[in-house]
Image: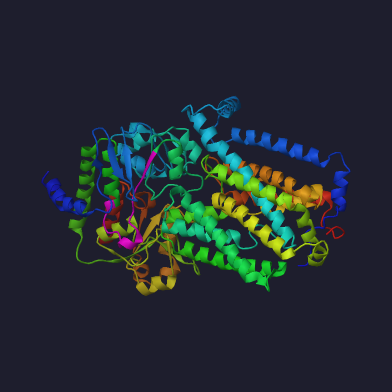
Amino acid sequence: MTTTVGKPSPAPAARAWRTGALSHPVLLVLLGAALVVSALMATGVGPVGVPAGEVAGILVHHLRGGGDTGAAADLIVWRIRFPRVLLGAVVGAGLALAGAVVQGVVRNPVADPYLLGLSHGASVGAVLVLTTGASVLGALTLPFAAFAGATAAIAVVLVMARHRGRLLPMRLILVGVAFGHLFAGVTSFMLARTDSSAAQQQIIFWMLGGLSGARWATLPVTASVVVGVGALLLVRARRLNALVLGEEAGAALGLNASRLRWYLLVLTTLLTGTVVAVSGGIGFVGLIVPHLARMLVGADHRRMLPVTALLGALFLLWADVAARMLIAPAELPIGILTAFLGVPFFLLVMRARGLATGENA
Amino acid sequence: MKRTVLVLAVVLPLTACGTANPSPTSVASGQITVKDCAGKDVTFDKVPERVVTLDGYAAQTLVRLGVADRVVGTGFPAPFGADSAPHAERLARIPVLAERVPVNEVVAAQQPDLVLTSFESFGGPPGSPKEADLVTMGAKGLTSCLKGSSEGPLTDLSPTYEYVRKLGAVFGVRDRAEQLVAELEGRAQAVAAKVTGDRPKVLVLQDNPVAGQPLRTSGAGTIAHALISMAGGQSVFSDVSSMHAEISPEEVVRRDPEVVWVITDYTFAKLKGQELVAAVRTNPLLAGTTAGRQSKVVSTSQYLVSFPSPLNLDGLEQLANALHAG
């Protein structure tokens, strides 16, 4: 458990990558372009067939400021699919970024955004709403309860993990995992106790995650939080590098490790709480995507954080296409797809690049 | 005619008492307002013209109200198989959007102005439209309303009748709705008239019990529970409320049911139809009960008894005949 996430000095495989044809800016441009193309393609795909030309026409019409036309295709493409595709990209980027930061903060490669009890805390909040049928804030009740649950969970974890004013990685992990189990137990208990089969279905779907809650009205808040927190994280990327080196090395560089951990964890909570609130507990993205990014550009957070965000966005966007299409016109929880698509892809890249063989861990 | 009047005399005071889900009220001329299950007003400026039924149950009600031509598509058509002439033929002509409950986008493609489900809420099955999605597509939504667990066991078919009346109001066919309710209530009365003093203890099973696992039964809030009461039996699990309640096999033996009522065709059941009934009949876990010893096992398809639908009366008649036969 003392394994570090990967030292900021370039790992051999990453160095090999960078001495190849692609420089870091080129890679970012390529990923950005892939994301735009993917978003357009994903908007063209759905259980209801809309010809590609018509999809393009509808998008152009709206992006130029045109209003709703009232046509079924317009409703489907602009009001249902496109916000969902964008939400997928935003949530994917958010989860991947949060994963990268948590892995750095606790210096553990198997950490993910949910390690500190966040998603289980959010689940408790969401399930309370789903089982009691509370709707104090209308359609925003569920996201708000999930966010409140996540925040309360991490607050408890941080307070319990604190030791003489310091936040130590190992205590964070242990306390986080322990509370995660407690919250999962509470959720399961409420699930078992509820009478409504509709509520049961909603709870199970919520725990596995999904993007069907996407709407134009709520997208800007989520997107702003992800972009804003992403920028703040990037500003701290160099210090995060130092933090990964360890307490003593960090102190030698004039770093207050505990304070930086607090700061980064608060940002991660905001990030994860926001995306979990709208998408449920989508697993695996925050665990795997940061490692993919490290394989591509090395462990320097200044380089890997932007790549992580773009890869996360791409990955979740396509996972959602699969979730919508595999058993169309029914739908699968996206958490199933992130595992089905992510694991083989990750293993493939790991083997191809000869990573985690010991000499670069 | 005399019977109808009698039935109305019995029933009208009951509906007047049922303020939890009040009967529809008209606000302005041409405008119709009904309450949803949470008591919120749902207002219609005109009679809906493009209706999507997320499940076949709602469509079965609309066919009987004579407004099937407004249904532009349905999901989950499986209940149609349990319907009879002349309704079955009319139902077969409704376009099927999906074998299960259709996802949001498929419903939106029909540009509905009203979306109906006989399930208790929107947004249960993954990807199916939630209430916010209906707002996006400019449609109203109405679900049937089962009682909450706090309101005590369901012992009548008020959810079924209420939904018929509500839809009758929305489609401007109140008379037809009252006629249908009176006919359904008449059938219920006919069953009640035949019920004798002896009330057998009934265990509902939704699947074949397996050793070491809990059994699945229908709790007190369900249509199935109401039908048992109305057919002159008593459920042995009136104290659990869930639609798919899990109960301990030991508790089944302790409560010693005299009749096992197998509700077939649930998607999660490992065996279907009469195969399931045959397996339950020979199940050693039930051998110690009175029902097991006397091999008193009766069955009904879930399409008749799981959600509010006019076919609930078919289920009631089947159960009553089976309970009191021999």
- State the residue lying farthest toward the front: A254
Q: Is residue B305 left or right of residue A345?
A: left
Q: In the image, what residue occupies the spot 58% across and 51% down?
A: A274
Magenta range: B140-158
Is residue B26 part of the magenta span, yes or no? no
Q: Is residue A327 left or right of residue B175?
A: right
What quarter of the picture does the N terminus of chain A occupy?
A: bottom right
- State the residue lying farthest toward the left: B2
Q: Quadrant of residue A355 in the image?
A: bottom right
What quarter of the picture does the C terminus of chain A occupy?
A: bottom right
Q: Position of residue A219 (x, y in %)?
A: 56, 42
Query: Is any atom of residue A341 visible in this view?
Result: no
Q: Is residue B31 left or right of residue B120?
A: left
Q: Nearer the viewer, residue B204 or A74?
A: A74
Q: How many marks?
A: 0
Q: Nearer the viewer, residue A359 or B173?
A: A359
Question: Height in image: B193 above or below A18?
Answer: below
Q: Position of residue B108 (x, y in %)?
A: 47, 35
Q: Is residue A111 left or right of residue B192?
A: right
Question: Height in image: B285 above or below A278?
Answer: below
